[in-house]
Image (cartoon, rainbow, N blue to C red):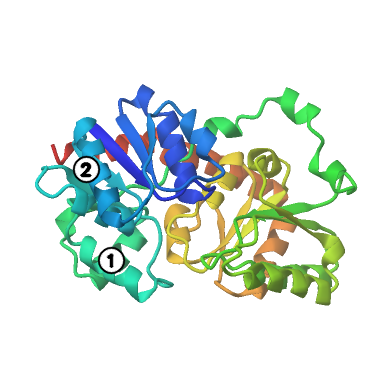
Amino acid sequence: MRIAYLLGSLNRGGTETLLLDVFRNAHQNGLEAIGVYRKTGTLEQDFLQSGVPLFKLSFQKNVLGYLFRLRKLFIDKQIELIHAQQPLDALYAWLACMGTGIQIILTLHGYDYNNTKLANKILSFIIKRTSINIFVSDTQREYYQQKYTLKSQKQRVVYNGISFDKFNIPDSILNTNKSLRDELKLAHDTLLLGTVGNFVSVRDQLTLCRFLKKLSDANIKFHFLFVGKRDESNPYLYNDCVDYCQLNGLSELVSFLGSRNDVPVILSQLDAFVYATDHDTFGIAVVEAMAVGIPVFVNDWGVMTEITEQGKYATLYKTKDPGDLLRHFLLFLQNRTIYKSKAIDAARFVRDTYSIEKHIQNLKKVYNSLM
């Protein structure tokens, strides 16, 4: 079975990171695939070196030319199945493949909360014309199935997968790399906390800032790391956090590190990971933190409740309630040994449940159901 994966750009993001891990593990897991993308990005070289043939097809004069070139590529490469990662690409594939018998799968990686009218029209049109729709959590599937009155037999849940090899960091590397505490000129016994994620609308870093103010008011000594870049489309999400920290005397206690390519090393040095979401569909950053074996705190949004087994493998706090987060965090400080033991159990759980190998196995089951 020959599969074509469609991507928009190759910039760093959750979807692109997932697909890159799929590509890197495709051959050893029996996936015969190609990748097709429209725009370059920071991960382009990584994709080109992934082992999966990659083809760049971008708009030139008009969309019709793009569709003809897309159709020709699919036919030349004897593609049997197309897996799109966003509704627009699924629509392009549907138009390009008319009369070919090629089947189309769409994975919905997000919600439609902030869609434009045009984006919603595209979504509502194509979501009922694909062969199968894949959702990254059951919570997300229920939302779409109810809102768009979808046939249940055409909907599947495939949890995201993570290549956990990058988290198996040898001591030799940890010992030779400058530690975060040294990099930030912190005392080696500093309580080091952090979160990972770009400042985009699905996240709620401002609630974390309000929690840090309460933590500081409680005379807890700490340093907090925000790992993630400012979204130039919505710069206020980042700017509001920086302003809040400056106005509330937190600037010396907080570091905004921007985008980093050493997240596994950063996570391995944290004493705890703290996360707040508005409407994540899965939560790769949360799973990655759990995989490292550090205590994780995340709000009780439905998806987070789902992926943590109703809080068995992470501490859940009330959404947008920094006071409740503080209450749970103070319990952690009083019982760090118990929380560390829970974190080790969580690492075993997520490495088995959310591995890239398990993800590809589940994808193949979906693919095979169409053959």
Looking at the image, the residue that sits furthest to the front is 61
The reply to whether dot 2 and dot 1 touch (C-beta < 8 Å) is: no
Q: Quadrant of the C terminus?
A: top left
| Front residue (pair 45, 351) | 45
Q: Which amino acid lies under the numbered mark 2 shown in the image of this protein?
A: Arg
- What distance separates the C-alpha of mark 2 from that of mark 1? 20 Å
Which percent across, then down, holds residue 108?
34, 56
Q: What residue is pinned by disc 2?
A: 71
Q: Quadrant of the N terminus?
A: top left
Report whether 27 appears left or right of 14: left
Q: Residue at x 36, y 43 (%)?
A: 57
Which percent across, then down, holds residue 8?
41, 50
Q: Residue at x 68, y 40 (%)?
A: 268
Residue 299 image-quadrant placement = bottom right
Q: Is residue 1 visible?
A: no
Eyeballing the image, is 178 above or below 171? below
Eyeballing the image, is 36 above or below 92? above
- Earlier in the chain: of badge 2 and badge 1, it is 2
Report whether 133 appears left or right of 321: left
Q: What residue is pinned by disc 1?
A: 122
Q: Which amino acid lies under the numbered mark 1 shown in the image of this protein?
A: Ile
Which percent across, then down, holds residue 187?
90, 47
Residue 161 image-quadrant placement = top left
Q: Residue at x 60, y 34 (%)?
A: 167
